[in-house]
Amino acid sequence: MHNPPLAAVVEDDLFLSEIYSDALRSSGLQVETFYEGQSAMNALKEMTPDLIVLDLNLPNYSGIEIFRALRNNPATAETWVLIVTADPSQAVELSQSEIESQNLLVLSKPISVDQLDQLAKRLTFQK
């Protein structure tokens, strides 16, 4: 656990990525923001955030591919991931065991700043 906790936001919509990042910063987290899948994949091999906000529909690598890479990496296998998607049916690409895995929440867009704030505090500061 980082002090303060570190969050990664992976969202290609610039407006939403800034909203999510600002909300997490105001919750007391450090934030790294990625706007497409390739840069996120590269960075997440080297960093171990305490929380990841992940869109599914991304350029270069999908959120599903990123999620699976996170779970296959021992350093991030148990990191909290908030999949935030406009189309929850995209989550059907996840296997049943992935959906039921610990430390995963699938949320439908739009999510409120208050909801993100409360989740971030609960998932990172109460460890």
Image: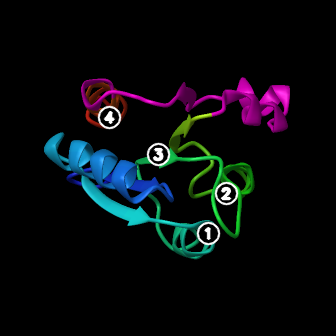
How far across and down, in percent of the image, does residue 26 sit?
14, 44
Query: What residue is rendered at 74% in x and 56% in y?
Result: 65
| SS at circle 4 | helix
> Label 4 crowding class (10 Å Cα cut-off): few <14, some 14-19, many 20+?
many
Magenta residue check for 99: yes
Mark before the other along the chain sequence, 2 or 4: 2
Q: CA distance from mark 4 to mark 1?
A: 22 Å
**C-alpha gap between disc 1 and disc 3:** 13 Å
Q: Amino acid at mark 2?
A: Ile
All told, the count of numbered labels is 4
Amino acid at dot 3: Val
For the residues labelled 2 and 3, the Cα–Cα distance comes to 11 Å
Q: Earlier in the sequence, mark 4 or mark 1?
A: 1
Please tell me whether residue 18 is drawn above or below residue 95 in the rendered image.
below
Q: Residues within 10 Å of mark 1 (few under 14, many from 20)?
A: many
- The residue type indicated by label 1 comes to Met
